[in-house]
Image (cartoon, rainbow, N blue to C red):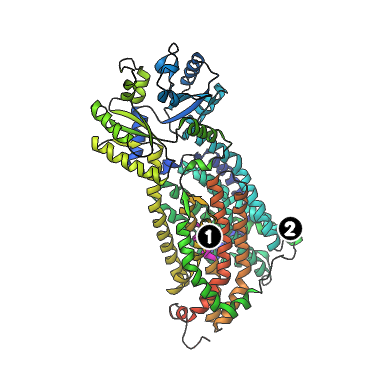
Amino acid sequence: MKKFSNFVVKNKKIIFIISLLLLIPSIIGLLATKTNYDILVYLPSDIETLRGQNILKDDFKMGAFSVSLVDNDVSDKELIALENEIRKIECVNDVVSINDITGTTIPLEILPKNILDRVKSDDSKLLLITFKTGTSDEETADGVNTIKELSKNIKVGGMSAMSLDMRRLVESQTFTYVLLAVLCCLTVLMISLDSYIVPLLLLANIGISILFNMGTNVFLGEISYITKAIAAVLQLGVTTDFSIFLYHKYEAAKKNKKTNDEAMKEAINETMTSVIGSSLTTIAGFLALCSMKFGLGKDIGIVMAKGVVFGVITVLTIYPSILLLFDKFIQKTKHKPIIPKFRFIKPIITKGYKWIFIIFLIILIPAYLSQRKTEVYYNLDKSIPENYDYSIVSKKLKDEYGLITQSIVLIDANMDSKDINSMIDEINEIDGIDNVISSNLLTKYGISSTVIPSKIRKLLEADNYKLILINSNYELATDELNSQIKEINKIIKKYDSKAILAGEGPLMNDLVEITAIDLKNVNYVSIGVIFLIMFFVLRSISLPILLVTSIEFAIFINMGIPYWHGTSIPFVSSIVIGTIQLGATIDYAILLTTKYLEERKRGKNKINGVEEALESSVSSIFVSAMCFFGATFGVFMVSKIDMISSLCLLMARGAIISMLVVMFIVPSVLLVFDKLIIKTTLGFKKGKLA
């Protein structure tokens, strides 16, 4: 440890220069990292619905598809000309409209009304566009852009259009997220630290670690848009206190050492163990997300765990170099910290800790039950603002065409027509089924199978499979739709055991089922791993249980608030917030408890031990929590993406709730269970305690 600190101090200029040079490859890596805007690709690759997606892509050349709208002002001949222009786009597989069946000489009005209502409204016509490439592929996004540029009379819908709108939202707002997070943290640091330039140096150091982290994501190939949007903000929020701790140790050491270099060596030595120990719980919390079957957890978990590691490395190497090189400027900008002393907390705790503990027990069960009742939504549409193209088209398709949720059945190409018709009849009898479309259906309306154009046959039939389209009246990811999907699956398996139900509806159903299991598993894993780390750090059997229970109580309150407000939260938030809040804020409890144990081992009674722990810890906990709050609350205020704003609100609120729990509940728990703690914690000698 001493060798390391000597090396850092001796080579401070070299370390600073190298860190600046390393920013170049980091920025290149950041720009080269691809972003995935399709959350559904994170589903396990072995599930049946994704196998169905692969069949659609390989056999039907349908990597993605878009149900689009063309204004009625466009004549039939102009529409066919527009279709031909769209087909020329490299990633487009084919374009189909009703004119591809009737041509330009047969008026659409001769079609049966129930068919006509599905392809034409008072002011628009339907257009189905299939793409060779996947929903979130760069080529598909470019293709959608090109289609929009071809004519102002076409509005593109579908998941590929949603991915494009999401991409524009994220790209337009990410810089704002980071800027607001920096400004909020800067405000907190300016009033809590004793120098005006230190906050700037501190944020510069964290900025370097963030760039290192985001730059090395290039080795992952790609990251999700959610990870991209929150990674920098979250890393800033959870690693700021590392730098604060080092600075305080450095300033304290300067009073006893002859030179700044000697003071920094001592500061690094004292900081290293604490920061590494503190970071372990945060890293463990993020890595627990990797236990999820839903790949988004691994995406967020790896990036954020890596971010904390970079935060520790930079705070022990680059930040000491920066402080030493800019020490003269630090001294010139000194001021008195403007931060409350929180002296009012000590008498509240020491006089009323029993009542606080009783209140804690009374609220614990209702808090647990409330968070279980909080509604979660899976419909990704809610993340797109209503004034964006995708939302406008989706509303129009729903209101004017009754196109709400589509599923695709893939059956054996050799299946008998009678069986297909029987199967379709059974599917039509299921509650909430709007219509079922297949090549067999067209013959029912007088369109002979022999005159069906090859492009229509190519859309619905391949060498090994036939395709059946199902439209449901139920919204995506609702209980009604999920039940309906189960019924459809039973029917199609009865007629063809190898039949596959694919499309948005089944994919979202898989998402609901998989993430419901992930929610339980990731919580168990995070609690278990953090419990083990605390067991070795605190060398106690009882304290990990007591402290984890206290922070879980804070999580219950945080997650239960939406239930009392009557609001729902996106499924991603429900899965990751518990792990993030536990991993990021358990450090507050460990900090206070460690000081309490030190005082008790010195022979002070439990009341004085808690008072000393509060005196030395509360300010640090407050600053750390407020930085976490500031970094995430600013994003919540400006984000137009509900999935991101909701997650940031939960993190911001969770930081404050955890802070209050550690300030009031944890000291009460320590006092109530003092005897148990002493008996189950190593390092205490009998007869030495008051």
The kind of secondary structure element at disc 1 is helix
Residue furthest to the top: 105
Q: Which residues are magenta?
A: 580-587
> Residue 657 location, x and y as percent?
56, 63
Q: Kindly report the distance in space between the C-alpha atoms of the residues bearing marks 2 and 1.
A: 42 Å
Q: How many marks?
A: 2
| Category of crowding for the residue at label 2, using alpha-carbon neighbours closer than 10 angstroms: few (below 14), some (14–19), many (at least 20) | some
The kind of secondary structure element at disc 2 is helix
Tell me which secondary structure the magenta stretch mostly adopts: helix
Q: Disc 1 marks which amino acid? A: Asn
Residue at mark 1: 558
Residue at horizontal 36 percent and vertical 35 percent from the top: 53
> Residue 137 location, x and y as percent?
46, 33
Left or right: where 508 falls relative to 250: left
Q: Which residue is at the front of the view, 493 or 419?
A: 419
Tag 1 or tag 2, which sits nearer the N-term? Answer: 2
Can residue 676 be seen at all in this image of the molecule? yes
Does residue 407 sit above or below 341 in this rendering?
above
What is the quadrant of residue 246 in the picture? bottom right
Residue furthest to the front: 113
Residue at mark 2: 329
Left or right: where 574 falls relative to 338: left
Q: Disc 2 marks which amino acid? A: Phe
Can residue 1 be seen at all in this image of the molecule? no
> Residue 361 location, x and y as percent?
49, 72
Q: Nearer the viewer, mark 2 or mark 1?
A: 1
Q: Is residue 582 magenta?
A: yes
Residue at horizontal 61 percent and vertical 69 percent from the top: 618
| Category of crowding for the residue at label 1, using alpha-carbon neighbours closer than 10 angstroms: few (below 14), some (14–19), many (at least 20) | many
> Residue 355 location, x and y as percent?
55, 77
What is the quadrant of residue 28 in the picture? top right
